[in-house]
Amino acid sequence: MRFLVVGSGFAGAVLAREIADHSEHHVDVVEARDHIGGNCYTEKESETGVTVHRYGAHIFHTSNLDVWKYIHRFTEMMPFINRPKASIEKGIFSLPVNLHTINQFYAKKFSPLEARQFIDAIRRQDITEPQNFEEQALHFMGEDLYRAFFHGYTKKHWGCEPREIPASVLKRLPLRFNYNDNYYSSLYQGIPKGGYTAIFERLLDHPRLSLTLNHRWQPDDGRSYDHVFYSGPLDGFHGHRRGRLGYRTVFWEEHIETGDVLGHPGINFPSMDVSFTRRREHKHYEYWKQFDKSIVFTEYSKETGLEDEPYYPKRLTADKALMNDYLSDCMQTERTSFMGRLGLYTYMDMHQVIAESLSLARDFITAIAAGQPRPIFPEGFRRQLVASGSRLRP
Ligand SMILES: Cc1cc2nc3c(=O)[nH]c(=O)nc-3n(C[C@H](O)[C@H](O)[C@H](O)COP(=O)(O)OP(=O)(O)OC[C@H]3O[C@@H](n4cnc5c(N)ncnc54)[C@H](O)[C@@H]3O)c2cc1C
């Protein structure tokens, strides 16, 4: 049998490697870009020697021990804790909002209990069932912290009023009454020592794998294969025939300076007074090396035009309705599985994408060994269908 994998990000590369490792079948990987690794791609910038994360800084984190062990087969991880800062008019503050942020912001010396009581007194308790992001934030932390750290950032990042964004988006962001400023609550966290691209080179280095770069998948490509695994955009697979799913895209301005520019890997700029959302100084993700010069990426968000890379699925109400229609189309598509953050039209961190591909590969190998009917859908696809209220079941 021969299989085709579309896309060489973590979704495609892990899936392809697993099938090559655990079956005797051949896998062809096609990639539209001129390099592997999807949005995790890193490369050495020539003037500074710094490893830059070309599509935005990526910090690996997971609480899934299997995924943590898996990634260690392909790289050494250097310890790293993501501790972003926020620059606002009042000064530079610690994120995510924690006891230090609250004490700095209100110029207090609250204990955890005092801070909790203080926030309880100022938060909007009259909003009992928050209907959107803004109400959720006001209910959580009150007007001041919301305006300072979330309102402008959210508006710039998503390009809409926070009132238009589901409350569930904020539920994921922590508000802490201790000094823990670790952005993630995962058990394991790190940065790959040799950069991300080296992981993908090793993942795709297998005698039963072949790779073609600069090839954008076409509907006829799958004809000669027994199964296609598609990690490109969901609406793109169906030729956008029902319309386009909403995405935000990001773009970066780069500049090089001598010495240390930010003094930190990442600073967010929530204020509406500046048009960008955050700045990243990449050499601080490679803190074990010395560099004379430094490169800083300043990040902006905008609507995704026809030529832009889709980054963040917007998942507004109209998008979800369209997504459900496309998911129904997927179920009618023979010999094809959809995966990854684009194929499933959902934001996923790297560890989630890897876990999904490992599990999809396992299910697929079991199914072909048993001669069971296909297509096979990953867990994320099944979750999307259930969440959409669809009666269709893969
Ligand atoms: C700015 C930013 C920062 C992030 N930071 C983090 C972080 O710190 N930690 C974290 O865990 N996650 C982070 N993520 C998420 C992470 O990027 C994703 O989890 C991961 O890239 C998903 O892998 P994927 O294979 O699904 O998609 P991608 O990495 O996007 O790979 C998809 C690949 O498919 C290719 N492709 C698309 N369409 C076609 C086609 N028609 N034909 C051929 N090839 C095609 C694309 O070129 C791409 O290479 C971040 C995401 C963004 C946007």
Image (cartoon, grey):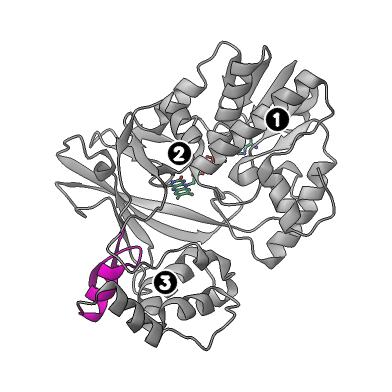
Which quadrant: the C terminus?
Answer: top right
Q: Horizontal and vertical percent for residue 4?
A: 69, 25
Left or right of 370 on screen, residue 107: left
Q: Give the residue pinned by disc 2.
A: 40
Q: Give the residues in magenta.
A: 84-108
Question: Which residue occupies the foreground of this view, 332 or 210?
Answer: 332
Task: Report whether the residue tagged 3 is closer than 8 Å to ligand 1.
Answer: no
Mark with earlier residue (1, 3): 3
Q: Secondary structure at mark 1?
A: helix
Amino acid at circle 3: Phe
Q: What label sits on residue 150 in the rendered view?
A: 3
Q: Which mark is residue 363?
A: 1
Which residue occupies the foreground of this view, 64 or 248? 64
Q: For numbered disc 3, what is the local secondary structure? A: helix
Going by the image, does 120 lie left or right of 289? right
> Residue 56 lies in magenta, yes or no?
no
**Residue shown at the point (81%, 49%) measured from the top left:** 328
Asked whether the residues under the numbered discs 1 and 2 touch, taking CB atoms below 8 Å apart as contact, a structural biologist would say no
Q: Earlier in the sequence, mark 3 or mark 2?
A: 2
Q: Residue furthest front?
A: 113
Residue 344 higher or lower than 20, as above or below = below
Which of the 4 image quarters holds residue 98? bottom left
Query: How many other residues sit within 10 Å of disc 3, few (<14), some (14-19) or many (≥20)?
Result: many
First-in-chain label (1 vs 2): 2
User: Looking at the figure, which quarter contains the N terminus?
Assistant: top right
Q: CA distance from mark 1 to mark 2?
A: 26 Å
Identify which residue, 33 or 279, lies in the foreground: 279
